[in-house]
Amino acid sequence: MSFAARQARLRVMTLAESYARRFGSDENTWPIRVPREPLSLEHLVREALPEDHSRFDVRSLRGRTLLNFAWDAGGEWELWTMTLPSGLKLFCDAGADETRILASGGRHASDDTDRLFLTLLAESGGERFGIEMSGGAPTAIRTAVEDREQLVDFFLHLFEVTGAEASVRAQLDHAGVALEPGPAGADFRETVASWLDMAAS
């Protein structure tokens, strides 16, 4: 990365931090802090680099990718983190049309903060962070989360909240995956676990 590119990146990150200081939190989300509405990174780049924004690659801000969803019918969604020079972690998402800052996770935030963010995201279907997660279950996923049980819990809550159960079962049926009956109340969790094995392969 050239010196000019590094300077441009620093200007964008500095402005992002100034916005992040205004994010709010409550006892249920701390240390996660959330803006009143998702903050467009494209708009932030235009503000930070009024004359050079068209040459700035927003992807240069990306750090760790937490989740990447893709659908056979087209479309992709990615959840990733950006770590600012101060150590403040930002949670961002990217879809077809826009890249947004959804929340901050504190300075030098740990994997526990990632876990809390993902839990809040799934249990609210994205609503807590000003987004709507819809479109049925993705057909392929990539993730940096290594804890399989955490992933099963995440998708279980997400699919139940967003009403995606039928699309999960339809994918497994289309792939010829037979599901064995389990204890009462455990059926859909086992279904999600089987779907995860298929979608993440």
Image (tube, rainbow, N blue to C red):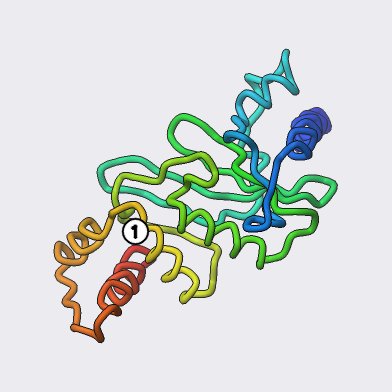
Looking at the image, the residue that sits furthest to the bottom is 183
Determine if residue 66 is in view: yes
Viewer-proximal residue, 48 or 91?
A: 91
Which residue is rendered at x = 72% and y = 64% of the image?
110
Against 169, is 185 above or below?
Answer: below
Against 114, is 133 above or below?
Answer: above
Which residue is rendered at x = 47% and y = 45% of the image?
127
Q: Position of residue 136 (x, y in %)?
A: 29, 50
Determine if residue 2 is in view: no
Name which quarter of the figure residue 7 lies in. Answer: top right
Neighbourhood count class around disc 1 (C-alpha, 10 Å): few under 14, some 14–19, many 20 upward: many
Task: Tell whether 12 sits left or right of 158.
Answer: right
Q: Position of residue 159 (x, y in %)?
A: 34, 58
Residue bearing the label numbered 1: 159
Name which quarter of the figure residue 156 lies in. Answer: bottom left
Which residue is rendered at x = 34% and y = 63% of the image?
199
Q: Quadrant of the C terminus?
A: bottom left
Going by the numbered disc 1, the residue's amino acid type is Phe
Task: Tell whether 98 sits left or right of 26.
Answer: left
Q: Quadrant of the N terminus?
A: top right
Task: Tell whether 195 sits left or right of 26.
Answer: left
